[in-house]
Image: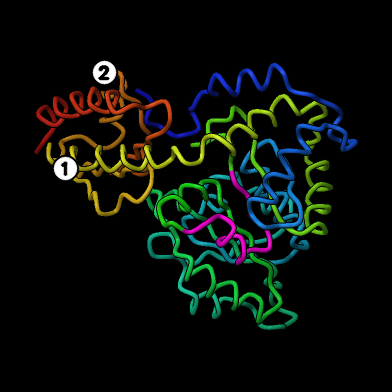
């Protein structure tokens, strides 16, 4: 049972059929009809003028930063954000910009702190040119950043002539959990990236949406990164299925995650089901005789995979390839392990 991430999802039978039958052309020339349909569909869903198909969420975030900033600029972002933690320092390497991290609460930055972080015009300071928001917030356990927070930060950004980018890798999870449409979230962003290859089950790819002018710059940045994918319609075809068939079922992942959290707490693990808003569960090992890494090693030996967030915390992620019966089998493993390792 693979609870490491929703990135491990396999493409559905319908996706595989769409891949096999996809009409293709050269996307670098703008001639792949399936890629074009995917981009048009995404732009329409998010209420933006245009969209760009990219190879990964990291590429989507980085082409957005490249399109929004100049070398020597500063980007305000949450201190535990994916861009800051998990993208190999790409914003510094590729765009020559520096991060200004702000510690948020459940992934949401305080708008007043964001306002205070914006640099005044001074020859000694970098220019604040971008604010980035992540939703859902991975290192907070898949928590949803409220739409009110989006709006407040966006309004502050516009007061100062600053753009807002959203790392919305799991924005559809946020929309399902909050009953707020992705189009509403996108209203308060100049650009937004979302992944097709996580809970939506496509094998490869992410999308960036924004204005036509922004997407033109992002497309050039994608080319600089070697992201022109030629006959990419075979991948885009799965993305179309992801957007048209796989969004509503995310609710099942959320329900399974809540069920898993409740049962883990019943066993005795340090889990707070009240914090489970989407498809992630954070389990702490403070009441065990082993740390997170040792527990993971034993879990793996018994057929359950997950990842550590720290020496004392483990992330469990539900997705399309994890059924309720899979979770029940995993819980049997967890119950035996708790009896072995509890303090």
Residue 231 located left or right of residue 114: right
Helix, strand or loop at label 2? It is loop
Whether 188 is among the magenta residues is: yes
Please state the horizontal and vertical placement of residue 256, each as a whole percent of the image: 31, 37
Give the residue displayed 76% in from the left and 32% down from the top: 34
Q: Identify the image quadrant of the N terminus.
A: top left
How many neighbours does mark 2 have within 10 angstroms: few (below 14), some (14-19), or many (20 or more)? some
Residue 311 in sight from this viewpoint: no
Whether 73 is among the magenta residues is: no
The residue closer to the viewer here, 333 or 53, is: 53
Q: Is residue 226 above or below residue 8?
A: below
Give the residue displayed 25% in from the left and 30% down from the top: 295
Please state the horizontal and vertical placement of residue 94, each as a whole percent of the image: 73, 49
Residue 42 located left or right of residue 140: right
Give the residue displayed 36% in from the left and 31% down from the top: 306
Q: Is residue 282 above or below residue 102?
A: above
Helix, strand or loop at label 1? It is helix
Q: Which residue is mark 1?
A: 265
Mark 2 or mark 1: whose residue is earlier in sequence: 1
Label 2 vs label 1: CA separation? 20 Å
Give the residue displayed 38% in from the left and 25% down from the top: 2
Please state the horizontal and vertical placement of residue 196, each as a whole percent of the image: 59, 37
Q: Which residue is mark 2?
A: 302
Q: Identify the image quadrant of the C terminus.
A: top left
Q: Quadrant of residue 319?
A: top left
Span colored in magenta: 180-194
On residue 116, the disc is none
């Amino acid at each position: 049972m693979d609870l490491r991430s929703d990135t491990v999802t396999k493409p559905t039978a319908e996706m595989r059929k769409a891949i096999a039958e996809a009409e293709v052309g050269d996307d670098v020339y703008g001639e792949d009809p399936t890629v074009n349909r995917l981009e048009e569909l995404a732009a329409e869903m998010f209420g933006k003028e245009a969209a760009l198909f990219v190879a990964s969420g990291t590429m989507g975030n980085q082409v957005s930063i490249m399109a929004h900033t100049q070398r020597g600029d500063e980007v305000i972002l949450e201190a535990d954000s994916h861009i800051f933690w998990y993208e190999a320092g790409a914003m510094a390497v590729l765009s020559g910009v520096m991060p200004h991290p702000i510690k948020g609460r459940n992934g949401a930055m305080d708008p007043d702190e964001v306002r205070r972080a914006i640099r005044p015009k001074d020859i000694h300071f970098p220019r604040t040119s971008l604010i980035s928001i992540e939703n859902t917030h991975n290192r907070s356990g898949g928590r949803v950043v409220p739409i009110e927070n989006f709006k407040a930060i966006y309004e502050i950004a516009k007061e100062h002539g600053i753009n807002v980018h959203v790392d919305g890798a799991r924005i559809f999870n946020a929309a399902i959990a909050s009953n707020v449409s992705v189009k509403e979230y996108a209203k308060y962003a100049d650009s937004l990236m979302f992944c097709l290859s996580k809970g939506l089950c496509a094998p490869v790819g992410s999308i960036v949406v924004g204005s036509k002018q922004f997407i033109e710059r992002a497309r050039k940045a994608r080319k600089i990164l070697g992201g022109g994918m030629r006959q990419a319609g075979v991948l885009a075809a799965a993305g179309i299925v992801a957007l048209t068939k796989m969004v509503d079922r995310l609710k099942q992942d959320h329900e399974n995650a809540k069920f898993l959290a409740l049962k883990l707490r019943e066993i005795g693990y340090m889990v707070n089901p009240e914090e489970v808003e989407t498809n992630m569960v954070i389990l702490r090992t403070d009441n065990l005789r082993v740390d997170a890494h040792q527990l993971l090693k034993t879990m793996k030996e018994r057929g359950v995979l997950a990842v550590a967030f720290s020496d004392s915390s483990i992330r469990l992620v539900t997705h399309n390839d994890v059924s309720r019966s899979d979770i029940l089998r995993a819980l049997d493993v967890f119950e035996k392990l708790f009896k072995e390792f509890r303090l």
